[in-house]
Image: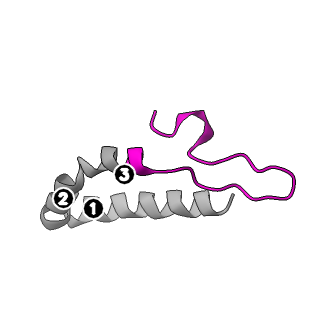
Amino acid sequence: MILDDNDGLTKPSNNSRSSILNHLDMEQYLGRYAGLMLYLKEMDEGIYAKLCAVRAKTVAQTHSL
């Protein structure tokens, strides 16, 4: 969807490492949900904690590539 088929990463060449592509489009897309996240944080801390855990897991997986 937003990340296309490359998961938002450049393909490493020879001895180089993967790098993150420009994420401005994704930031603008996800920015639509900022108010909802603030509401969720205030109204249902349990679900907000689960959401944060999923995000942390995804970030950890991305950085382990």
Highlighted range, magenta? 1-26
| Residue 2 appears left or right of 35 | right
**Marks 1/3: CA distance?**
19 Å
Label 3 secondary element = helix
The circle on residue 63 is none
Earlier-in-chain disc, 1 versus 2: 2
Asked whether disc 1 touches disc 2, contact meaning CB atoms under 8 Å apart, the reply is yes
| Residue 41 appears left or right of 49 | left
Earlier-in-chain disc, 3 versus 2: 3
Question: Is the residue 22 above or below the residue 42 in the image?
Answer: above
Q: Which residue is mark 1?
A: 48
Q: Residue at x 47, y 64 (%)?
A: 56
Earlier-in-chain disc, 1 versus 3: 3
Tell me the kind of residue under disc 3: Glu
Q: Is residue 40 magenta?
A: no
The circle on residue 40 is 2
Q: Residue at x 52, y 61 (%)?
A: 59
**Marks 1/2: CA distance?**
6 Å
Q: Which residue is mark 3?
A: 27
Q: Nearer the viewer, residue 22 or 1?
A: 22
Residue 35 location in percent, x, y?
A: 16, 55
Which SS does the magenta portion mostly show? loop
Q: Residue at x 14, y 59 (%)?
A: 39
**Marks 3/2: CA distance?**
19 Å
Which of labels 3 and 2 is toward the front? 3
Q: Nearer the viewer, residue 8 or 45?
A: 8
Picture quadrant of residue 44:
bottom left
| Residue 55 appears left or right of 6 | left
